[in-house]
Image: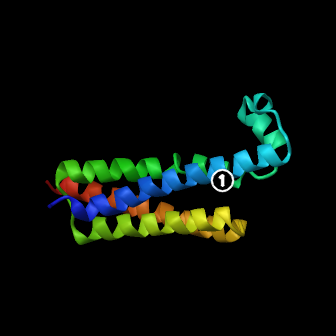
Amino acid sequence: MFYKPLLYPLLIQVGLTFLVWLRMYQTRLAEIQARQIDPNELATRRDSRRLLNNTAAADNFSNQFELPVLFYLAIMLALTLMLQDRVIVFLAWVFVILRVAHAIIHLSYNNVTHRFLVYVAGGLAVIGMWVRLGFYVISQ
């Protein structure tokens, strides 16, 4: 199938988002039970940040809807334009691999410097995707 080169990294990114979502609820429910927190006390994000100690998974889940939005849009535009050259596919894989690394760092040892460097590299990959898309549109 023609669209598979870009669909694989897209599906992996979506899968990562769902895995982080599951991890968020796993850690959140465990902490609520262990500390006997009334779920009604967690009605807002502010309440959750105030009452819960472990918010890394929730923070990472929120991150999955920040920079990745530009990735999703770039993928959709590339598919619409039928652009799947080596450059765009390579950059899509680089972005997704870096997002997986970012999530692993965030949900494990959470070194901010390591996480930031991976985040910036992923951002550069998405910028590269958009530059490639821009050149393609201009050249047509």
User: Residue drawn 38% across and 68% down?
Assistant: 93
Q: Position of residue 125 (x, y in %)?
A: 43, 65
Above-or-below relation of 62 to 107: above
In the image, 17 versus 138, the foreground residue is 17
Above-or-below relation of 4 to 73: below
Q: Is residue 110 left or right of residue 98?
A: right
Q: Position of residue 52 (x, y in %)?
A: 80, 45
User: Residue drawn 61% across and 54% down?
Assistant: 23
User: Residue drawn 15% across and 61% down?
Assistant: 2
Q: Position of residue 84 (x, y in %)?
A: 21, 62
Q: Secondary structure at mark 1?
A: helix
Quarter of the image for residue 51 reads top right
User: Residue drawn 85% across and 41% down?
Assistant: 36
Quarter of the image for residue 92 reads bottom left
In the image, 130 versus 60, the foreground residue is 60
Q: Position of residue 117 (x, y in %)?
A: 60, 69
Q: Amino acid at mark 1?
A: Ala
Above-or-below relation of 109 to 11: below
